[in-house]
Image (cartoon, rainbow, N blue to C red):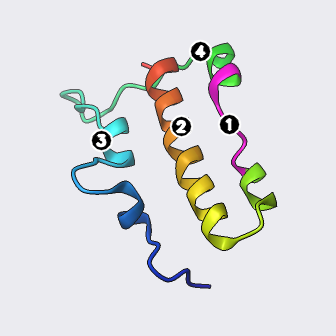
Amino acid sequence: MQIPGFTAEHSLGPGQQGMQGIWAQPAAPNGVSPARVCNPTCLDNCEMDCSDCDDLPTPQSRARCRVYCFRHNLQCLRQCCH
């Protein structure tokens, strides 16, 4: 299924890093990257359930909701994980 005018790249907008910029961490000298440590209580209180977007009436509103939810949850990762 295609939604005209909506792509993942388009939703990020110009100059935004996307997921790679969030999880990119320098590798250790032995090639092993450190694990992310997250506060589960912080994540539980912050993250949104993106499945709620499925209840919206139009494809455009569902797409906008998913983009907003995805960005919000990425911000939660930045806030709750290190």
Q: Position of residue 62 (x, y in %)?
A: 66, 62
Q: Nearer the viewer, mark 2 or mark 3?
A: 2
Depth order, front residue of 39/18: 18
| Marking on residue 48 | 1
Q: Is residue 81 magenta?
A: no
Left or right? Give the position of 53 relative to 3: right
Q: Is residue 48 magenta?
A: yes
Q: Nearer the viewer, mark 1 or mark 3?
A: 1
Distance between the alpha carbons at the discs numbered 4 and 2 = 16 Å
Left or right? Give the position of 81 relative to 1: left
| Marking on residue 21 | 3
| Marking on residue 78 | none
Q: Nearer the viewer, mark 1 or mark 4?
A: 1
Q: Which residues are magenta?
A: 45-50
Q: Position of residue 3 (x, y in %)?
A: 55, 80
Residue at which label 4 appears: 39
Q: Earlier in the sequence, mark 2 or mark 3?
A: 3
Distance between the alpha carbons at the discs numbered 2 and 3 = 15 Å
Distance between the alpha carbons at the discs numbered 1 and 4 = 16 Å
Q: Earlier in the sequence, mark 1 or mark 3?
A: 3
Distance between the alpha carbons at the discs numbered 4 and 3 = 20 Å
